[in-house]
Amino acid sequence: MTWYAIRQGAFLALLFLLAGPAGAQTGGQAGVVTVLDGDTLKIAGVNYRLHGIDAPEKAQHCQRDGVDWLCGQEAAGYLRDLVRGRVVTCTERDRDRYGRVVAVCHAGETDLNRAMVRAGLAWAYLAYSRDYESAEWEAQILGTGLWAPSVQAEPAWDWRRERRAKPPQNPPRIRG
């Protein structure tokens, strides 16, 4: 390989990382980062579930000052802001039952998992890990996000369980 080809390849790699909303490096893969919700990223076709945290679901609503609050949308938006324009790296910790890679992800030096919990936009998922318990205590003490005194929020795991247990609102009619 010639010096020119090496230099051109390095230049193209740099352009690739700067061109998208966020570059990503995960075990040799690179690609644009897409935020699926407050605790899930998609990079190069692979879904990454953030280890040790659980954010409100995208369709989940909470109450803030007695008013409906799209807490799931806000969590996803905050994660999107954290990764925008930054190189994201993910380190696999496990695989979940849906085939997603469970990982600790960083945008530059920022631990995305910890940042979501500290901002009060995700719960420490203590059923699976205690890694972010102190970050949740900090959010509680500061009263940020889901821990604000005026907020009523159901943990995402309870919200999902309730939705699975409820029958459909309008069951199809059977004609006979």
Image: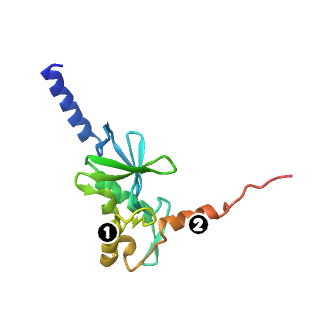
Label 2: element kind: helix
Viewer-nearest residue: 56 or 125:
125
As measured in the structure, the alpha-carbon distance from the residue carrying label 1 to the one carrying label 2 is 27 Å
Q: Position of residue 20 (x, y in %)?
A: 29, 41
Q: Amino acid at mark 1?
A: Ala
Q: Amino acid at mark 2?
A: Glu
User: Which residue shows up at 22% across the image and 54% down it?
Assistant: 109
The answer to whether residue 146 is above or below residue 74 is: below
Bin the neighbour count of mark 1 within 10 Å (Cα to Cα): few under 14, some 14-19, many 20 and up: many
Crowding at mark 2 (Cα within 10 Å: few <14, some 14-19, many 20+): few
Which residue is located at x 28 percent, y 57 percent? 111
| Residue 162, disc | 2
User: Whole-percent x and y of residue 175?
Assistant: 83, 52
Residue 91: x and y in percent read 33, 48
Most distant residue in the right direction:
176
Looking at the rendered structure, the secondary structure element under dot 1 is helix
- In the orientation shown, which residue stands out farthest toward the left? 3
Q: Quadrant of residue 3?
A: top left
| Residue 6 in the figure: left or right of residue 124 | left
User: Disc 1 or 2, which lies upstream in sequence?
Assistant: 1
Mark identifier at residue 135: 1
Q: Which of the labelled discs sits on residue 92, or is there none?
A: none
